[in-house]
Structure formats: C-alpha cells, structure tokens
Image (tube, rainbow, N blue to C red):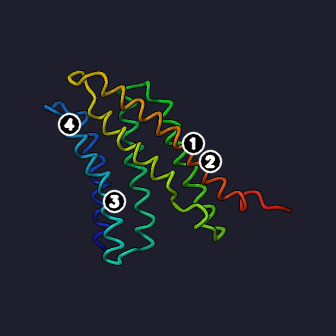
C-alpha cells in the first residue's frame, strides 16, 4: 500500500459521499457535495505528485487512478442528469468518449503501443473544463442565480466538444496501428 494509492482509494470513497450529500435533505447539501467533489478532483493531482515525488509509481496505481477518475466523473454526471435532463447529450458524449479511449488504450497496450495514446494536453484541458463544469452544476440550485447553472451548462458542453477533439487526436495517434498499411 502506497501513499498515492491511498489517495486514490480516498477519491473512490468520496464518490458515494458526493452523491449522498447532493441528494441529502440537509442545509447546503449542494455546497457540501461540491466541496467533496472538489477534494476528490484535486486528489488526482495529489496522487500523481506523491507517486512521482516519493517514487511510488506502480502498475496497480497506473490502473486504479484512471478508473477512479472515470467513476468520479461518470457518477457525478449521471447524478446531475437526474436533476437536469438537459445535460444528457453532453453527458453521453463525455462518458462515451471515456469508454472509447479506455478501450483504445487497452488495445494499444496489448499491441505494445501504449505511448502512442499517452495522456495529451487536449485530454488534460478537457478534464479541467469538465471538473469546473461539474462543480458549477453541483452548486447550482434555486437559491443561486440562474447564471450559475447556465455557466455550468455551457462549460459542460465545451467539455463535450473538447472530449470529441481529444478523442480524435488519440485515434489519429493510434491510426498507424488501427489501420496498418498493406
């Protein structure tokens, strides 16, 4: 058990806490849920930093970290679609992209070409916009100005566009393996 993996486990444990807080009948439930989601999102930076700083990288950590990230995002988006059905299209694009890229990475790794689909800037940009959008949408409720929801909606749709853009880049980088020349 390493420190980075413990931080990743914390992120996994925060997922049901976010959902519970968001749906709880407590004062400031959405603020608590947004705070927990923010902590979970930032823990991704922390586990990566600790893995490099403490030289505690592992194959298990390399597997678990993206799984925790994808679960956090997918479950938060599903939770938000239940409250705001207008988010369904962007949510479908984002979750669909995550499934496709995970499958592509697994397939490329089986071909010994993992580096061709390593995390790129476009993927990091998509993740940043997506996390800000989700936090904004979790915070949105009738007590906040409508522009909070509208801003989150806009950011989530930008994240969906960035998802498509980054997915196309990953597939282009893998095209030499996907479509070998005869």
Q: Is residue 140 left or right of residue 104?
A: left
Q: Residue at left 86%, top 62%? A: 182
Q: Which mark is residue 45?
A: 3
Residue 121, placed above or below residue 95 = below
* Image position of 35 (left or right of 180): left
> Dot 3: what SS?
helix
Q: Residue 7 at what x, y percent from top left? A: 28, 63
**Residue picked out by circle 4:** 31
The earlier-in-sequence mark between 3 and 4 is 4
Identify the residue position indicated by label 2 in the image: 168
| Crowding at mark 2 (Cα within 10 Å: few <14, some 14-19, many 20+) | some
Tell me how far mark 3 sits from mark 1, CA to CA.
Answer: 23 Å
What is the CA distance from the residue labelled 4 to the residue labelled 2? 35 Å
Q: Name which quarter of the figure residue 181 lies in.
A: bottom right
State if disc 1 and disc 2 touch (CB < 8 Å): yes
The location of residue 82, given as percent across then percent down, is 37, 29
* Residue in view at x 37 percent, y 48 percent: 72
Query: Mark 3 vs mark 1: which is more N-terminal?
Result: 3
3D distance between C-alphas at marks 3 and 4: 22 Å
Mark closer to the chain start, 3 or 2: 3
The crowding category of the residue bearing disc 4, from other C-alpha atoms within 10 Å (few below 14, some 14 to 19, many at least 20), is some
Provide the residue designation for mark 1: 164
Residue 38 placed where, x, y %?
A: 27, 47
């Amino acid at each position: 058990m390493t420190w980075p993996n413990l931080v990743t486990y914390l992120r996994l444990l925060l997922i049901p806490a976010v959902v519970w807080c968001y749906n709880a009948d407590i004062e400031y439930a959405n603020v608590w849920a947004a705070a927990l989601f923010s902590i979970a999102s930032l823990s991704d930076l922390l586990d990566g930093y600790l893995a490099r700083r403490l030289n505690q990288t592992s194959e298990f950590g390399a597997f678990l970290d993206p799984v925790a990230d994808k679960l956090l995002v997918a479950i938060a988006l599903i939770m938000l679609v239940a409250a705001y059905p207008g988010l369904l299209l962007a949510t479908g694009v984002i979750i669909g992209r995550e499934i496709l890229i995970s499958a592509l990475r697994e397939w490329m790794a089986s071909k010994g070409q993992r580096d061709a689909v390593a995390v790129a800037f476009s993927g990091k940009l998509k993740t940043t916009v997506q996390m800000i959008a989700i936090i904004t949408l979790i915070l949105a409720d009738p007590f906040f100005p409508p522009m909070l929801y509208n801003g989150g909606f806009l950011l989530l749709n930008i994240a969906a566009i960035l998802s498509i853009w980054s997915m196309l880049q990953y597939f282009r980088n893998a095209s030499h393996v996907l479509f070998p020349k005869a």
